[in-house]
Amino acid sequence: MIGDDEWLFCLASITQTKCNHHHPTINTHHSSSYKHFIITQHPSPNNMQSSTPNTQHPSLNTIELLAPAKNLECGMAAIEHGADAVYVGASRFGARQSAGNSVEDIGKLCEYAHRYGASVHVTINTIIYNDEFEETLDLVRELVDVGVDAFLLQDMGLMSKVREIVPDTVALHASTQCDTRTWEKAQWLSQQGFDRVVLARELSAEEINDIHKRLPELELEAFVHGALCVSYSGVCYVSQYSFGRSANRGACAQFCRLAFDLKDSDGKTIEHQRHLLSLKDMSQIDNLETLMRSGACAFKIEGRLKDINYVKNVVSAYSKRIDEIIGKHPGEFRRASLGRVRYSFTPDLKKTFNRGYTNYFLKGRQADIFSPDTPKALGEFVGRVKEIRRDSFNVSSTANFANGDGLCFLSRDAESQLTRLEGFRVNRAVGNRLYPFKMPRGLKPGMGLYRNQDQAFDKELSGKTAERKIAIKIWFGTSSETSPNPSKGGEYLTDSRGTMWTKAEVIGSSTPNQISNERISNEHPVRLSPPLGGVGGGLQLAQKPQRDNIIRQLTKLGNTVYECAEVEIVDGADKYFIPSSMLAELRRMVIEELDKQVMNMQRMTIYRNTKSKLSEPKPQFSMVNPSQYQQLPYLYNISNDAARKFYEQQGLTKAEPAFEIQYPTGVANGSEPSGKSFSIKGDKEAVSHLLMQCRHCIRYSLGYCVKRGGQKPTWREPLFLELPDKRRFRLEFDCKNCQMNVCNVT
C-alpha cells in the first residue's frame, strides 16, 4: 500500500491561460478581447453564500506537461498518468501519417481529459494543397464541435482561415515546423494570430530565456523528450528529394537514420558506412527546472508513434519530476490541470525505447549528441559479458534478467571494419547466466551488453498502473428555520420543513500545507428540502451525533474522478437525524454541479487583445526568417492559394511554390530539376537545392572544428555524404551561423 506521502499533487486553476506567466486581473464579465471566469472565494463556515470574484493572484507560473497520443487508449493513459495536455493527430493532415484518429475518438478523448481540466491539442501541421483546403476546414469545424482546445498548424494559408472560423476558446499553436529560432520569428507568429509557439528543438536555455524576456506574454513550448530530427524543425526536404516522401506532408522516410560514407573532394573516404546524421534521443528530465525558469511553460514529449507503455513510463517520470520541483518551490509554479496521481510502478526512462540520451543544445554545443554506430534503440546498459560457453554466457551485472528479455550489443566486423548492432532474445535466465534462443556469433568476452526489452518491466506496465483523482473539500450544513439566516451559512428555503445544503470545492496545492486562494467550486450551495417531521415540521434531532454517517455518505465518490480530502460540518448540523438516502442525493447533486465547473474550464488566450497588438512595433519581414529564406523562397512552403496570398500581403515579392509542388515525385525519382541554381554561401560551384539545415555539425562532432579547439582537417573540402547507391550530398559548413547545410549535387 502506498502512503499519503507518496501521492503527487497538481495545482488547480481556471483563472488564467494555461501556461501564461503574467496573470491578468479576473473580472466577472465577458468581452471580445478576453474570456473571464468567475472564481468563488474560499467559503467561510459562516457565509457559504460568498461567490465574489477573486482579484488577487499569486505570481505563479503555470506548467503544462504535454504528452503524445497515438490513439484514444494512449491519450487516456497519458492523462491518467499525469499529463496536463495531450496532442493527437486527426484522420488526415498530421505530421505523422500513421497516427491519425477519427473525430469520434478525439471527442471521447476531449471528454475524458476535460474531467481533469486537461487539454487536447490536434495536429493539422502539414502543408495543405488547394484541393484539400475546404476538406481541412470542414475537419477543423468538426473538431471544434467535439471540444478540442487547440490546433497545431504550420501552413500560414490554413492558419489565416482557421483563425476566422474557430471561437476564441480554441487556441492556435505554431508547430515546430514553423522553424522558430529567434524572438523576431516568435513575435511575428504571435502577431499573425498564434497563441503559442513551439520552439525549434535546437535552442539553448539561454536562447529560450531571451525570447521569453522580449515576449513575456507569449506561450513558449519546448520539446523535452524523445527522438530528434537532425534538421532544424521544418527545414527538411531530403526525404521528398530522395524518395518522393514529404516530411512536410507527414511521410518522412528517415533519411537521417541511414549509413553514409563521408568523402572529401578528392574522393578520400574519411568515415565508412556510419550513421553520421543519426542523433541520440533527447532527455531533459534533469534540466526541467532550468527550462521552467527559462520562460518555457509547456514541455512536450515526442512520440506519436510510440506504444502505450512508452507513454505510461515517460509521462509518469516527467510528471513526478515536475511535481517534485513544484513541491520545492510552491510559490513559483503550479500545474495546468487538476488531480493527483498514484502510481503502482516506479518510472525508469532507461527501460523505454531510446537511442541513448542527450540534452542536445540546451547547455550549448556538445560533440556527443549523435549515435554514429546505430540508429536503433540500445536501451539500458546491463553489464559486460564474462565467460562464454557453447550455449550460454554469464554477465557481470547487478541487473535481474528474465526469460524473454531482449538484449543487444555492438560488434565490429573484422573483414568490413563496420560496427553493427546485434540483438537476441533470452530463452532462459539462471541468475546472471543467460541462455539465448540462438547464440549470437559476434558476442565476445568484455563486450558491453544492453537491454532494449525488459520483460518484467513490460509485464508491470501491462495492467492498471496509475490512478488520478481530484481532491475536494465538502461542506455540509442544515437549518430548521423558517427564514434565511446568513450567519448559519448557505441559503435556506422559506418553508418550515428544514433545509440541508452542501458545497464542494477542488483543493489545489503543491504541498498539503499550502492552499491556493483560487478555487473551483459549485457557485452556490446545493440545497435539499426534505419533509422531515420534527418539532414545528423542521429537522428532527438525532438521539446520537450523526457525524460519522454524514462523512461516510458524502465521501462515497465511487468511480468519479474525485476523492474527498476533508468534510466540514457547519454549526452543529450533525445533531439532526439525516437519512442516508438524503445524504446520497445531496452528494450526487453537488458532484454534478462540480463536474459542470470542471468540464467547462476553458483556456484564456492573451493575444486576443487586438488593440494593443495593432500598436506593437512589428519586425521587418526580412528579419523573421534566416537569410536562406530570401535566397530560397520554396522554404516558405507555399502550397495553396491562401498561403500565397498571405505572404504577398506580408511583402514577400518572390513567392515560389513549395518544394513538393515543384518536385512532386522527388528530383531523384524521375523529376528533372528546373534549371534553377542556388548557392547558400555564394560559391562559384552552385548547388541545386538546400535539403537540410542542421545545428548538428559533422566536422565539429568528429573533432575537426578549429574555431572550437578541434584539430586541423587533413581533407580537402567540400565534403560529401555518399549512399551505397552512390548518390551524393554536399556539406556546406556555415561557420558564421554555426550551422551545417546538406545540399544535393548538380
Image (cartoon, grey):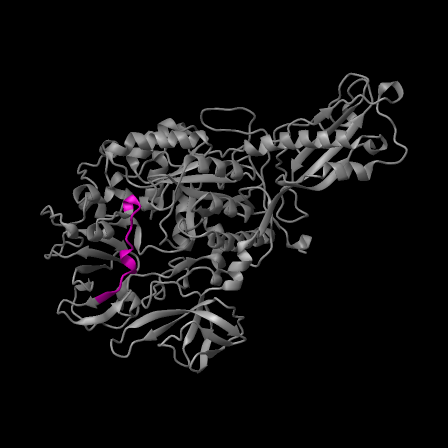
x and y, in percent, of residue 20 in the image: 48, 40
Residue at position x 50%, y 63% in the image:
455
Q: Is residue 258 magenta?
A: yes
Image spot of residue 373 (x, y percent) = 32, 68
Q: Is residue 63 visible?
A: yes
Q: Nearer the viewer, residue 443 or 721?
A: 443
Say whether residue 486 is left or right of residue 371. Answer: right
x then y, percent, for residue 702: 29, 69
In the image, farthest residue toward the top: 495
The front one of 64 and 379 is 379
- Residue visible at 84% across and 30% down in the picture: 577
Asked if residue 222 is positioned above or below residue 121 in the image, the reply reads below
User: In the image, what residue occupies the spot 28% across and 58% down?
Assistant: 256
Q: Please give the count of numbered marks on the rendered protein.
A: 0
Rendered position, 220 above or below 320: above
Above or below, comparing residue 401 to residue 567 in the picture: below
Q: Position of 108 compared to 675: left or right?
A: right
Quarter the N terminus occupies: bottom right
Residues in magenta, as a range: 248-261
- Left or right, residue 41 beside residue 665: right
Q: Quadrant of residue 611?
A: top left
Quadrant location of the C terminus in the rendered image: bottom left
> Who is closer to the viewer here, 716 or 447?
447
Frontmost residue, 743 versus 96: 96
Please indicate whether residue 74 sits to the left or right of residue 732 in the image. right
Any part of residue 209 in sight: no
Magenta run includes residue 744 = no
